[in-house]
Image: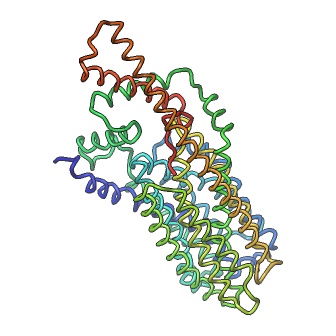
């Protein structure tokens, strides 16, 4: 088999093995995360005599533990490998989610949601980390979007399940909302157990790829990181990377470079600018729609088209972004769509609830494409890998607090229009929009400056090699030999600089 001429077929093979399993796991855990919103429309608060403050706290505490334990969970992922750790997280989350169905007070709901955030936090970064180990940078956003589409489909799935399960109201003397938690928790446990057999192992351990295919994939990753070249040049680049990585760059220095990089915080504000509206919508959408005058069942039905269309928008935007190799223009568009949607919600008339529904629909169609685009843009523009790992942990850890913030936007006292919640979403999206513009201008300016500096650096290396040839008494008439020596010296210099300085290197080109 000539693997190099059958790349597309090989990638499709990986897609079919990797993406469905990851998407199903994320769907189940996102379902557990947001089904409290569906349960609320069927009497959760009334039966447990929960105050609105207790309900808001139940939403908030989930994201606190979810964010705080992100990094420790990532460490365990590397220890146990994805095919063990991710199914284990899923089973544990299902058990905790099931316990929501037997809660007897608002306090117990709060406690269980706190634990749920703790056990569920590792899946999101774990799946993102696993995907990054199988695809090139230019292929990443579409695959991340496929993964995140599971979140939007979870919203649609949640509405359908809630309507169906609520018909069990009274069975076993349990209210319908209790069965929502119990059955969805059980389903998650079953999926998690099965996942021990279908979650993909690391590349070196899989049996469904030939050794030739594995070697070809590894070569693709090398070329993606270092650039094209002949086999000998690629080996030299790998050796240089290994040498440079040991030049005294400690983890403390790497952490310092992350914490002192203002772009990390700007990207984190962009993250919060999507997690606030994303989670405020996903947690509260059934309630928001119900307050427009719909029954509980109709409110859950009307959530379904929102999530389905949002999923399609996410895939379309990701495909276009990967196809063009651009990130920022599509983020401008996605965040702009969110702004339009929430502005419509704020300024709708009291007698036009359908306009409010339309605004939420539009906002959701901006949220779901923005999330994978935002994460991919950041990961594409951080290097080397040692810095990227820490930066992504900081990015996701702090950015996930947006869920805790957004969960408190739609207050009971602001119904039925919830102007405060919509206005807060506008504020955070606008801040993110400003940060996107700032980073885009910074990246574009830096790319132009570095283009000039690279040329000067390469000319300097050329002059140095030519001088060495003269000192060694070698003939400058050997043009081929001289050019080969210059090429190798320039390549060595570039890879040493990139490995040592990462995105601060003049040879690093930011993806726009």
Q: Does 217 appear above or below 176?
A: above
Q: In the rendered picture of this protein, how many numbered marks are placed on residues?
A: 0
Q: Specify the quadrant of the image occupied by residue 306.
A: bottom right
Residue 351: horizontal and vertical position, in percent? 74, 93
Q: Specify the quadrant of the image occupied by residue 133.
A: top left
Q: Could you tell me if residue 168 is visible in this image?
A: no
Residue reaching furthest to the bottom: 351
Residue 56: horizontal and vertical position, in percent? 76, 68
Q: How is the image coloured?
A: rainbow
Residue 244: horizontal and vertical position, in percent? 48, 24
Q: Does 338 appear above or below 437?
A: below
Q: Does 356 appear above or below 53?
A: below
| Direction from residue 191 to residue 363 in the image, left or right | right
The residue under the point 56% across, 21% down is: 248
The residue under the point 81% across, 78% down is: 414
The residue under the point 32% across, 7% down is: 472
Residue 423: horizontal and vertical position, in percent? 76, 71
Residue reaching furthest to the front: 477
Q: Specify the quadrant of the image occupied by residue 108.
A: bottom right
Of residue 227 and residue 354, the one placed in the foreground of this image is 227
Q: Could you tell me if residue 508 is visible in this image?
A: yes
Of residue 63 and residue 422, the one placed in the foreground of this image is 422
């Amino acid at each position: 088999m000539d693997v190099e001429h059958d790349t597309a077929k090989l990638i499709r093979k990986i897609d079919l093995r990797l993406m469905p399993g990851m998407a199903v796991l994320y769907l189940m855990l996102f379902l557990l995360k947001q089904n409290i919103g569906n349960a609320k429309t069927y009497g959760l608060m009334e039966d447990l005599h929960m105050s609105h403050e207790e309900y808001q706290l139940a939403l908030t505490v989930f994201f606190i533990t979810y964010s705080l334990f992100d990094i420790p969970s990532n460490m365990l992922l590397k220890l146990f490998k994805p095919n063990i750790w991710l199914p284990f997280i899923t089973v544990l989350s299902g058990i905790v989610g099931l316990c929501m169905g037997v809660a007897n007070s608002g306090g117990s709901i709060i406690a269980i949601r706190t634990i749920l955030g703790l056990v569920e936090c590792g899946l999101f970064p774990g799946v993102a980390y696993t995907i990054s180990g199988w695809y090139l940078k230019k292929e990443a956003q579409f695959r991340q979007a496929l993964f995140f589409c599971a979140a939007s489909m979870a919203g649609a799935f949640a509405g359908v399940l809630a309507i169906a399960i609520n018909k069990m109201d009274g069975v076993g003397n349990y209210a319908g909302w209790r069965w929502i938690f119990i059955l969805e928790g059980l389903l998650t446990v079953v999926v998690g157990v099965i996942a021990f057999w279908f979650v993909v192992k690391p590349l070196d351990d899989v049996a469904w790829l030939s050794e030739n295919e594995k070697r070809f994939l590894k070569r693709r990753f090398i070329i993606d990181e270092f650039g094209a070249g002949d086999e000998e040049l690629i080996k030299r680049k790998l050796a240089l990377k290994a040498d440079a990585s040991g030049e005294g760059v400690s983890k403390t220095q790497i952490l310092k470079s992350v914490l002192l990089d203002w772009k990390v915080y700007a990207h984190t504000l962009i993250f919060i600018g999507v997690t606030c509206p994303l989670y405020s919508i996903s947690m509260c959408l059934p309630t928001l729609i119900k307050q427009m005058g719909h029954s509980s069942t109709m409110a859950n039905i009307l959530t379904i088209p929102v999530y389905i269309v949002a999923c399609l928008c996410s895939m379309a935007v990701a495909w276009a972004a990967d196809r063009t190799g651009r990130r920022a223009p599509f983020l401008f568009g996605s965040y702009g769509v969110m702004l339009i949607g929430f502005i419509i919600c704020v300024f709708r008339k009291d007698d036009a609830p359908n306009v409010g529904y339309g605004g939420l629909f539009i906002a959701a169609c901006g949220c779901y494409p923005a999330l994978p685009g935002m994460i991919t843009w950041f990961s594409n523009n951080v290097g080397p890998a040692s810095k990227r790992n820490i930066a992504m942990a900081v990015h996701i850890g702090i950015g996930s607090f947006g869920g805790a913030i957004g969960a408190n936007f739609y207050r009971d006292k602001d119904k039925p229009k919830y102007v405060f919640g919509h206005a807060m979403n506008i504020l955070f999206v606008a801040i993110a929009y400003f940060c996107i513009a700032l980073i885009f201008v910074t990246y574009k300016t830096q790319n132009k400056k570095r283009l000039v500096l690279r040329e000067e650096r390469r000319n300097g290396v050329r002059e140095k090699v030519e001088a060495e040839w003269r000192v060694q008494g070698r003939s400058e008439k050997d043009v081929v030999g001289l050019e080969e020596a210059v090429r190798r010296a320039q390549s060595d210099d570039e890879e040493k600089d990139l490995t040592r300085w990462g995105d601060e290197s003049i040879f690093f080109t930011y993806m726009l």
